Image (spheres, rainbow, N blue to C red):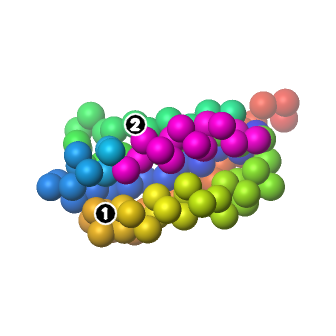
Amino acid sequence: MLVIQAKLEVQEGQIAAFLEAVQPLIEASRAESGNISYNLTCSVENTTEYYMLEEWEDLAAIDTHNKSKHFQDFQASVRTMLASAPRIQVLSTLEGK
């Protein structure tokens, strides 16, 4: 299983718009083949710092997700809402190792 942690720093005045824009992405991503979980979290210390925590079966599922219309639409819609470029980490679980 692969885990993605995507840090999204949202401009303070754009939080409500960001939260509205992210909902269709979450719903569509959860329905994708190969998706195990897809959750948005927010930092307790910094309310403009969001993390998308995703679990995927394999790299092929992630690749399909990254090419999906809902993911591409989300990226385009939030580009001006973010204070900086997203920081994305792809991690492998150690289960069974």
Q: Amino acid at mark 1?
A: Leu
Q: Secondary structure at mark 2?
A: strand
* Residues at discs 2 and 1 in contact (Cβ within 8 Å): no
Q: Secondary structure at mark 1?
A: loop
The answer, for residue 80, to whether it is visible in the render is yes
Which residue: 39% across, 63% down? 77
Q: Is residue 22 magenta?
A: yes
In the rendered view, does 73 fall on the left or right side of 68? Answer: left
- Give residue 57's quadrant in the image: top right
The answer, for residue 87, to whether it is visible in the render is no
The quarter of the picture where the C terminus appears is top right
Say if 22 sits above or below 9 in the image: above
Magenta residues span 21-35
Please name the predominant secondary structure of the magenta segment in the image. helix
Per the rendering, the mark at residue 25 is none
Per the image, the residue denoted by label 1 is: 82
In the rendered view, does 57 fall on the left or right side of 85? Answer: right
Q: Earlier in the sequence, mark 2 or mark 1?
A: 2
Q: Is residue 26 magenta?
A: yes
Locate residue 32, reporting x and y percent: 69, 42
Per the image, the residue denoted by label 2 is: 41
Q: Amino acid at mark 2?
A: Thr
